[in-house]
Every structure is written in structure tokens, then in C-alpha cells.
Image (tube, grey):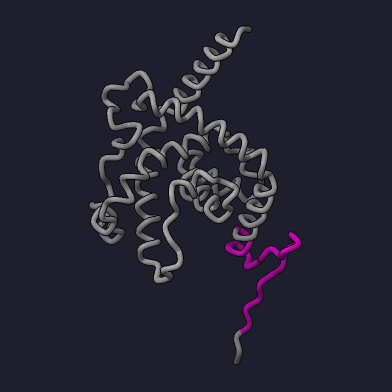
Amino acid sequence: MTSRENSWVSRCSVVLVVSQQIALLTPCLQSSSTNMAALRYKYEKNEDSSTSFPTLEDFLSLRTKPEIMKIFAGTFLSCVVGRVAFRRKSANVELQEFVTKTDEAFALLCIENIYDRFVKIDINTWYAPHQEGKRKRNCKSGKYTEDAHKAHRYGGWNQKGMSRFNELCKIVELDRDANKEWEEKYKRERYGAKMKERYGMHTNADGTSGVTVVVDDL
């Protein structure tokens, strides 16, 4: 197969993968928008001024920034794979066993699509947890979906979005290969949180389990 044929097959593969994600466009962008707003709202209400809202570069750093990767996984990847499935599986198996590279790349694409918009808006106006009716806004407008009505062929993503998805798939693949230890550590932390929530158990640094006993001081 020639290099030109390889390039053509690669482009077709990307279109096929994205077409499988298209059904998720509206719910994922809506969830990503709401979660991005909630995350920024949380950071702005945090009295610890030393903790700043993650930059787009922070999110794109993936596993090289473990704490930001946890936020990305719990806040955005869960939107793509489903919250119930994420909650159940993340405590038992490594992330890459149930989150595909295209899932991860798609979640990053959703963040890139809306990030600039959410660092400029008045978050207190857009996101009001105590006023349910003010949470929902137009979720399709963004960096790669601004001309969504003209891009029906790709389900709302413009050509730049398609190309960027291809790039993000490669970024995710390289990151996974270079930072495999993060997967096991994250699984242990999720398992520990699950056990603590369910049985009052905790996971020790060596991976063993213990029980948290609460004794009233009479």
C-alpha cells in the first residue's frame, strides 16, 4: 500500500470513528458545558487562592499531571462512557480497559471546543446551582461547532474539529504508553474511595485494605 493510500485509509478511519461518536454530540457537549461551568464555579468559590482553575494545557497534559487527569477523568470522561459505567468500572479495572483512546480524545475535543468560552463568561450568571432553570444554555456553539448547521456531514463538527480529533487520538496513545503507572494508581484510589463509602474501609499506601473505626470519646 502506497503512502497516499495509507493516508486515505487513515482519514477514512477517523471519519468512521467520529461518526460513531456523533450520536453523543449533544448530550456530551451539554454535559461537558454544565460540568465545565460547575468546575469553574467550584474553583471560584474555593477560598484557597493558591489553587487556580486548570488551563487548557493542563488538561492536554493528561497523565503527566496526575491531579488534573483525575479531574478530567471524573468530570469529563465519565460523560462519554456514562457515569454509572464509569463509577462501577473505574474502581475495579484500569481506565484504558473500558475507556478507548477515541473516547478520551473525544472528551478532550469537547473541552477544547468550549474552553475559551467558559474562561470568559461570568460563571455566576451562567451557572447557578440554586436556580435549576439557569443551568441550560446553547451547548453546540464552540471552537469546532460554531458552524455546526453547515457541517451536517460530520454531525456538527467542522473540518478543523475532525483534524484535531485525529491529532488528539495520537496524543492520547503516546500519553498512555508513557504513563502506564498512573492507571494502576488511579484504580487503587477509586477502589479505596468505593470501599470507604460503602464499608468505612480505606486503602493503605501498600495497596492493602484497612477498616476505619470511629469511636465516640465518652
Q: Quadrant of the C terminus?
A: bottom right
Residue 120 rendering spot, x and y as whole percentages:
29, 50
Residue 66 rendering spot, x and y as whole percentages:
59, 53
55 to the left or right of 191: left
Residue at 63% in and 57% down: 189
Q: Is residue 23 above or below residue 59?
A: above
Question: Looking at this rendering, what residue extends furthest in the bottom direction?
Answer: 218
Residue at 34% in and 45% down: 116
Q: Quadrant of the N terminus?
A: top right
Residue 111 rendering spot, x and y as whole percentages:
41, 42
Residue at 36% in and 27% down: 157
Residue at 44% in and 36% down: 109
Residue 202 counted in the magenta span: yes
Residue 36 counted in the magenta span: no
Q: In this view, does 215 lie above or below 55?
A: below
Residue 42 rendering spot, x and y as whole percentages:
39, 61
211 to the left or right of 120: right
Magenta segment? 194-215
Between 6 and 152, the one nearer to me in the picture: 6
Q: How many tags in the picture?
A: 0
Between 113 and 21, the one nearer to me in the picture: 113
53 to the left or right of 64: left
Q: Is residue 30 above or below residue 154?
A: below
Quadrant of res 139: top left
